């Protein structure tokens, strides 16, 4: 999800309210709101100076998608997702790399990919690649969706793919499964996944 700010006065659009005490324009308008159609056809009331979190549908009302004469949205943070009026085009890729080392568990900081919490939606495709050498015993334990019954081992040098329709993945936890002889150093797991843009309005 991206964060947007309503900015009803941009560039050459003129001025909004003038503070009679100072003769200067208010930082945010004390009287201006407007109604805009959101991505799901719902009408959203927006007030100057307010911020909201939503999908990148709203970038079409910000510069450079809109001219400085017409823009009324400012992008504060951009999650890199795409938005199209054609639903099938609203899928975008994401990659997360996790480095595993001795002491990491399925609940350790940096061991969890919170897909739903970060993007607002589930992953419809995922490819997990273990870059650790198989000969060194660099196996990883993978848990899907926080389910204790959905745990499997991803061996060093191997790849696991979940195609669209196989499973919806909202969370992945990964920990090392070092050999009985002890730690053999660190290795990396790469998660490549696809997300469908989720809109709040």
Image (cartoon, grey):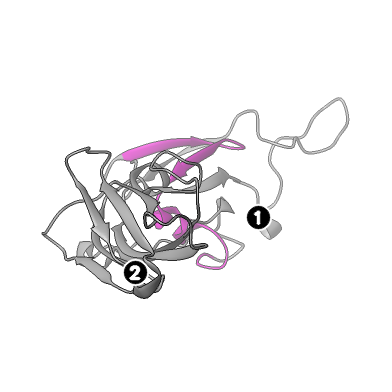
Q: Which mark is residue 156?
A: 2
What residue is disc 1 on?
Answer: 13
Tell whether position 62 is magenta.
yes
On the question of residue 161 being in view, the answer is: yes
Judged left or right of residue 153, residue 80 is right
Q: Residue at x 59, y 37 (%)?
A: 48
Residue extent of the magenta highlight? 43-66
Judged left or right of residue 2, residue 199 is left
Badge 2 marks a residue whose secondary structure is: loop
Judged left or right of residue 175, residue 64 is right
Disc nearest the viewer among 1 and 2: 2
Instruction: Locate residue 32, reporting x and y percent.
Output: 57, 34
Residue 125's image quarter? Answer: bottom left
Instruction: Locate residue 139, reporting x and y percent.
Output: 34, 61
Q: Nearer the viewer, residue 198 or 51?
A: 198
- Report, in whole angstroms, how far the alpha carbon at label 1 lies from the one at label 2: 59 Å
Q: Is residue 95 above or below residue 182?
A: below
Disc on the earlier residue, 1 or 2: 1
């Amino acid at each position: 999800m991206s964060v947007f700010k309503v900015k009803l006065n941009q560039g050459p659009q003129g001025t909004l309210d003038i503070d009679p005490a100072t003769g200067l324009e208010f930082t945010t308008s004390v009287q201006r709101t407007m109604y805009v159609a959101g991505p799901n056809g719902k009408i959203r009331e927006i007030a100057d100076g307010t911020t909201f979190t939503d999908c990148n549908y709203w970038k079409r009302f910000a510069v450079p998608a809109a001219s400085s004469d017409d823009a009324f949205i400012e992008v504060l943070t951009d999650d890199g997702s795409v938005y199209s009026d054609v639903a099938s085009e609203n899928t975008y890729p994401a990659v997360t790399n996790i480095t595993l080392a001795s002491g990491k568990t399925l609940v350790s900081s940096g061991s969890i990919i919170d897909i739903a919490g970060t993007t607002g939606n589930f992953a419809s495709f995922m490819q997990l690649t273990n870059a650790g050498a198989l000969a060194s015993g660099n196996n990883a334990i993978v848990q899907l969706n926080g389910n204790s019954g959905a745990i499997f081992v991803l061996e060093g040098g191997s790849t696991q793919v979940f195609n669209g329709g196989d499973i919806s993945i909202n969370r992945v936890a990964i920990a090392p499964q070092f050999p009985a002889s002890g730690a053999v150093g660190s290795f990396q797991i790469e998660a490549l996944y696809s997300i469908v843009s989720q809109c709040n309005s």
